[in-house]
């Protein structure tokens, strides 16, 4: 092929699959690979070609955090997964708080707000959504918790001590004081279940002698779109894989300066024939602070770009469900949405 | 779902209880269809949760066709993503 043609192909390839970070702006942001835009490229949707290119690599899996790569998918779908993880995967959280006695400093509504935000270890797939207008709650859609605590003075405390831990009993109300009260036949439905808040040491309120809190709480199933307390992830985010190319060989002092411009580990300096030469070691670690563009001599030596279809997802769960279950649920929810519209299309006759 | 348009080739679907989550991903799948001349979606008002999803086809193809194909393709993508994800989780945990 002619060099001119090859250069042109290279630049369209770059336009198609790299998002380039320039000094003052970002170029090639939107996906343009739709059928008809590029002559000579097969862009129509082909499930087989997608399945050949697509892959998922799980990088790090911990109890509450998951980092995985999705390669070969488009921004629209990756973003849909992220949005569903944040707002549409259901969880159980305290919704109604029946206050029988609250003589503490914390107001009723503030206390109720705090109780709602506590993550509850209960698998939401075992429960149903509450019907609208149903005030009582049945055993298949509600979990009942009780928080009953009273603060009293410690008679054995030393006369001059001012440490509240010594002077008072029960002056700190933690989430471990919340106890599950089974409704109806829940003891039969969930014989081994132990419903409690995910963390035992969440401080709810502070009390002094004579103050008491006696509340009953109803937990229901909800989604993050309704109230952020129902969101199952601490956060779910993605970034695109960075792609750093050195346009010219960089040596000696410039190489040292270049290494300092990027995050540690990205650029490594090799000793070739006595000269120090810079090489891109691991572009994935970079956070793209664009420090290179502040140095006149280094500006034109590198091209900063991102690979358009390689997403590095990072999902941190609040502890209710493990993060891999959350991602699977999110994908199933997107499928459910499509199925809903397919069913409607089939049932409603189109004129 | 509610559609209106002059002939069957240019249709605006109104999808209730939806937002960018389904709107953008469905738009991408429908745009990948070579029969589609125009595809776009917009949120009518941010306080109402409904989107206007418009498809215009070239040729004499009714616009419902690419809509249905787009939904099916999106389902296929999700199914494949789910399978690949679970396989790679399994491989990671067994290593």
Image (cartoon, rainbow, N blue to C red):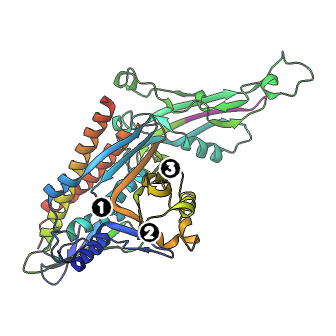
Q: Position of residue B81 (x, y in %)?
A: 25, 49
Residue A309 lies in what quarter of the image?
A: bottom left
When the figure is inspected, residue A28 is found, relative to residue A192, above or below; the finding is below
Cα separation between marks 3 and 2: 46 Å
In the rendered view, does A172 fall on the left or right side of A80? right
| Residue occupying image coordinates x 38% and y 20% | A191
Q: Which residues are magenta?
A: A209-216
Would residue B21 be found to the left or right of residue A4 on screen?
right
Which residue position is annotated with label 2? Answer: B47
Secondary structure beneath label 3:
loop
Q: Which residue does the image show at 30% across and 59% down from the upper left?
A: A77
Residue with the mark numbered 3: A265
Question: Mark 2 to mark 1: distance in Å?
Answer: 28 Å
Chain of residue at mark 2: B
Label 1: few (<14), some (14–19) or many (≥20) C-alpha neighbours in 10 Å: some
Disc 2 vs disc 1: Cβ atoms closer than 8 Å?
no
Chain letter of disc 1 in the image:
A
Residue B3: x and y in percent read: 20, 74
Q: Residues within 10 Å of mark 2 (few under 14, many from 20)?
A: few
Residue B23 locus on image (x, y percent): 30, 66
Query: Foreground: A300 or A123?
Result: A300
Do tags 3 and 2 sit on the same chain? Answer: no
Q: Is residue A80 left or right of residue A151?
A: left
Judging from the image, what secondary structure is the residue with disc 1 in?
loop
Locate residue A108 relative to residue A142 in the image: left or right.
Answer: right
**Mark 1 vs mark 3, CA separation in Å:** 28 Å
Which mark is in front, 3 or 2?
Answer: 3
Foreground pick, A238 / B60:
A238
Q: Earlier in the sequence, mark 1 or mark 3?
A: 1
């Amino acid at each position: 092929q002619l060099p001119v043609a090859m250069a042109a192909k290279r630049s369209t390839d770059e336009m198609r699959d790299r998002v380039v970070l320039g000094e003052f702006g970002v170029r090639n942001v939107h996906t343009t690979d739709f059928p008809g835009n590029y002559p000579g490229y097969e862009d129509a949707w082909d499930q087989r070609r997608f399945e050949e290119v697509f892959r998922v690599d799980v990088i790090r899996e911990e109890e509450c955090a998951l980092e995985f790569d999705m390669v070969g998918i488009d921004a629209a779908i990756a973003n849909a997964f992220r949005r569903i993880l944040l707002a549409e995967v259901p969880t159980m959280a305290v919704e109604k708080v029946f206050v029988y006695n609250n003589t503490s400093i914390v107001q009723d509504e503030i206390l109720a707000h705090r109780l709602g935000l506590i993550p509850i270890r209960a698998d939401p797939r075992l429960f149903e959504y509450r019907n609208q207008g149903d005030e009582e709650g049945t055993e298949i859609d509600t979990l009942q918790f009780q928080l009953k605590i009273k603060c009293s003075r410690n008679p054995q405390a030393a006369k001059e001590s001012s440490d509240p831990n010594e002077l008072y009993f029960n002056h700190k109300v933690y989430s471990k004081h919340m106890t599950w009260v089974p409704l109806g036949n829940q003891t039969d439905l969930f014989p081994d279940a132990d419903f409690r808040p995910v963390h035992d040491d969440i401080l709810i309120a502070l009390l002094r002698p004579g103050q008491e809190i006696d509340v009953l709480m109803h937990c229901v199933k909800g989604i993050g779109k309704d109230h952020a307390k129902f969101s199952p992830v601490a956060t779910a985010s993605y970034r695109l894989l960075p792609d750093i190319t050195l346009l010219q060989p960089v040596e000696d002092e410039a190489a040292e300066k270049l290494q300092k411009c990027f995050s540690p580990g990205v650029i490594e300096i090799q000793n070739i024939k006595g000269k120090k030469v810079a090489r891109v070691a691991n572009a994935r670690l970079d956070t793209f602070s664009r420090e290179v563009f502040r140095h006149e001599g280094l500006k034109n030596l590198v091209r900063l770009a991102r690979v358009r279809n390689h997403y590095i997802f990072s999902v941190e769960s609040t502890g209710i469900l493990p993060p891999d279950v959350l991602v699977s649920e999110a994908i199933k929810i997107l499928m459910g949405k499509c199925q809903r519209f397919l069913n409607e299309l089939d049932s409603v006759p189109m004129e | 779902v509610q559609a209106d348009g002059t002939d069957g080739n240019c249709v605006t679907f109104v999808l209730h209880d939806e937002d960018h989550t389904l709107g953008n991903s469905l738009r991408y799948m429908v745009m990948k269809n070579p029969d589609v001349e125009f595809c776009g979606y917009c949120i009518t008002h941010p306080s109402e949760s409904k989107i206007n999803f418009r498809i215009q086809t070239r040729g004499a193809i009714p616009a419902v066709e690419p809509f249905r194909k787009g939904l099916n393709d999106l389902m296929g993508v999700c199914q494949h993503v789910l399978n690949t994800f679970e396989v790679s989780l399994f491989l990671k945990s067994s290593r």
